[in-house]
Image: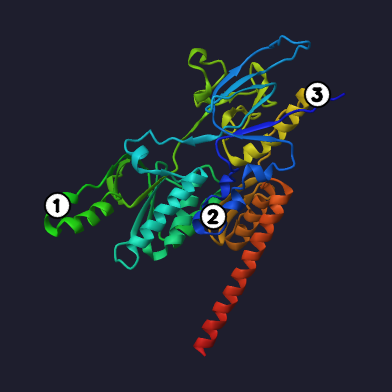
């Protein structure tokens, strides 16, 4: 008689978050439920038990016997912040990473990251407050985006489109180009869009520090108590970025911003789970990722698998695989299969990454897609936007959720089309 396996999913959030589409929350193109459904809804009728908790410590172990009529094996235990201790036979580590803000003085206090649903809500709330405060005023909203990798460029494109002529977006990068590892077609498409939206690129600079503007006292003496309070509220949310040149021939710069968005650096969460008295029990690399073999098993721990930001795996040429969503998606399929194979004493499959191309959003109706199967091809504009949304719709979890989201997107597209036709007809009739 086959014993039914029990599957537990532990996450600190109540929602699954499809991070590649967080930018669409800022643009208003998607609703939160579409890209961040609740685990309880996704796992309904699956038999998977969900715990909303945070893993505090990980204790892997060898064979462990119980004082009972039957001997059972235990792969180890995990301690949750709630105090609950869970024994596991098999463990999959997919903890992700968090933005590393403590590398520059002032970034932790004054910059906002953009990697979680909560981050997206905070950025949207801040933008709404600035839009209300600056509405109808001559002074534009100044937004500084630190980092011009994929995340920074997508964020700069989204925010600049949202603000239109009410804001100035400045993007800072230590490299002398944007998206240095991106396909040339994607990079050129992004440069074209950023230029059309007047995004100022400060390339070859790194941020030395971020400080808050403090000129409240001078204004208070001249305007009185009530106005000084208003000035204090405004100035408390203005920041100064000190830029240091990373290239010869450039001079130091000082930027002032109402909002600082940080997209540089990340740190895996795995090292935080090691007990103080048992450091290095897991084989971690310098970045804090678990070293795995080609089957995604953690080296020295045959009952633990790791993927995504938690995993350090090299390709056939010896290069470390990038910590991208595409790699994590593919690893998830292999980890699931290999976990089943290990439990049932079947051969495990070696992971082989297949580069399917790269995609980036550049606005509500704009994107760049470079598929790997056609060299030199880049889909831009509305076509790229549609291709990206279809690709990500396919990658959303569960058939039921994909169906609901697909219907929602189709309805929104139909409404937008009708509104566009009405707007065109109105212009034509008014012109005649």
In the rendered image, which residue does mark 3 sit on?
344
Can residue 149 be seen here?
A: no
Query: Relative to 287, does residue 411 appear above or below in the rendering?
Result: below
Badge 1 vs badge 2, beta-carbon distance below 8 Å: no
Residue that sits furthest to the front in the current view: 68
Q: Determine which of the numbered discs, if any, sits on residue 312 in the image.
A: none
In the rendering, at what x and y percent does residue 344 appear? 80, 24
Query: What secondary structure is marked by label 1?
Result: helix
Tell me the quadrant of the picture where the N terminus can be found: top right
- Sooner in the amino-acid sequence: mark 3 or mark 2: 2
Query: Relative to 41, does residue 26 appear above or below in the rendering?
Result: below
Instruction: Choose top left, top right, bottom left or bottom right for residue 166.
Output: bottom left
Residue that sits furthest to the left in the current view: 221
Separation of disc 1 and disc 2 at Cα? Answer: 41 Å
Its colouring scheme is: rainbow
Can residue 363 be seen here?
A: yes
> Dot 1: within a 10 Å radius of its alpha carbon, few (fewer than 14), some, or many (20 or more) residues?
few
- Sooner in the amino-acid sequence: mark 3 or mark 1: 1
Relative depth, front residue between 322 and 111: 111
Separation of disc 3 and disc 2 at Cα? Answer: 42 Å
Query: What secondary structure is marked by label 3?
Result: loop
Q: Residue at x 40, y 60 (%)?
A: 198
Query: What secondary structure is marked by label 2?
Result: helix
In the rendered image, which residue does mark 1 sit on?
218
Query: Relative to 49, does residue 259 appear above or below in the rendering?
Result: below
> Dot 2: within a 10 Å radius of its alpha carbon, few (fewer than 14), some, or many (20 or more) residues?
many
In the rendered image, which residue does mark 2 sit on?
24
Q: Residue at x 55, y 35 (%)?
A: 12
In the rendering, at what x and y percent does residue 326 appear? 63, 41
Question: What is the tally of numbered marks visible in this picture?
Answer: 3
In the rendering, at what x and y percent does residue 54 appear? 54, 31
């Amino acid at each position: 008689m086959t014993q039914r396996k029990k599957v537990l999913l532990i996450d600190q959030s109540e929602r699954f978050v499809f991070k590649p589409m967080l930018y669409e929350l800022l643009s208003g193109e998607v609703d939160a439920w579409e890209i961040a459904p609740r685990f309880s809804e996704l796992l309904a009728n699956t038999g998977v038990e969900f715990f909303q908790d945070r893993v505090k410590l990980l204790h892997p172990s060898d064979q462990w016997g119980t004082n009972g009529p039957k001997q059972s094996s235990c792969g180890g235990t995990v301690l949750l912040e709630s105090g609950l201790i869970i024994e596991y036979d098999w463990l999959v580590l997919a903890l992700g990473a968090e933005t590393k803000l403590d590398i520059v003085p002032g970034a932790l206090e004054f910059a906002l990251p953009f990697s979680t649903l909560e981050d997206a809500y905070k950025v949207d709330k801040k933008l709404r407050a600035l839009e209300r405060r600056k509405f109808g005023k001559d002074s534009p909203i100044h937004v500084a985006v630190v980092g011009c990798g994929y995340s920074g460029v997508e964020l700069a494109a989204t925010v600049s489109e949202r603000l239109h002529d009410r804001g100035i977006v400045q993007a800072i990068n230590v490299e002398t180009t944007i998206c240095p590892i991106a396909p040339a077609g994607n990079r050129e498409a992004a440069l074209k869009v950023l230029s059309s939206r007047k995004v100022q690129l400060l390339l070859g600079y790194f941020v030395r520090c971020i400080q808050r503007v403090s000129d409240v006292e001078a204004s208070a003496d001249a305007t009185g108590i009530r106005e000084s309070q208003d000035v204090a509220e405004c100035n408390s949310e203005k920041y100064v970025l000190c830029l240091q040149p990373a290239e010869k021939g450039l001079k130091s710069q000082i930027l002032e911003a109402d909002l600082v968005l940080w997209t540089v650096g990340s740190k895996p969460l795995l090292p935080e789970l090691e007990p103080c008295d048992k450091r290095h029990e897991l084989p971690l690399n310098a970045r804090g990722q678990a070293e795995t073999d080609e089957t995604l098993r953690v080296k020295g721990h045959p009952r633990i698998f790791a993927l995504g930001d938690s995993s350090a795996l090299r390709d056939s040429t010896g290069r470390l695989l990038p910590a991208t969503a595409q790699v994590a998606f593919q690893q998830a399929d292999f980890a699931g299969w290999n976990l089943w194979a290990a439990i049932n004493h079947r051969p495990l499959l070696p992971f082989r990454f297949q580069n399917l191309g790269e995609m980036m959003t550049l606005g509500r109706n704009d994107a760049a897609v470079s598929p790997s199967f056609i060299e030199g091809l880049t889909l831009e504009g509305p076509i790229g936007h549609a291709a990206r949304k279809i690709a990500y719709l396919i990658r959303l979890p569960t058939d039921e959720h994909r169906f609901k989201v697909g219907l929602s997107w189709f309805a929104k597209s139909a409404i937008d089309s009708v509104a566009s036709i009405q707007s065109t007809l109105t212009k034509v009739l008014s012109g005649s």
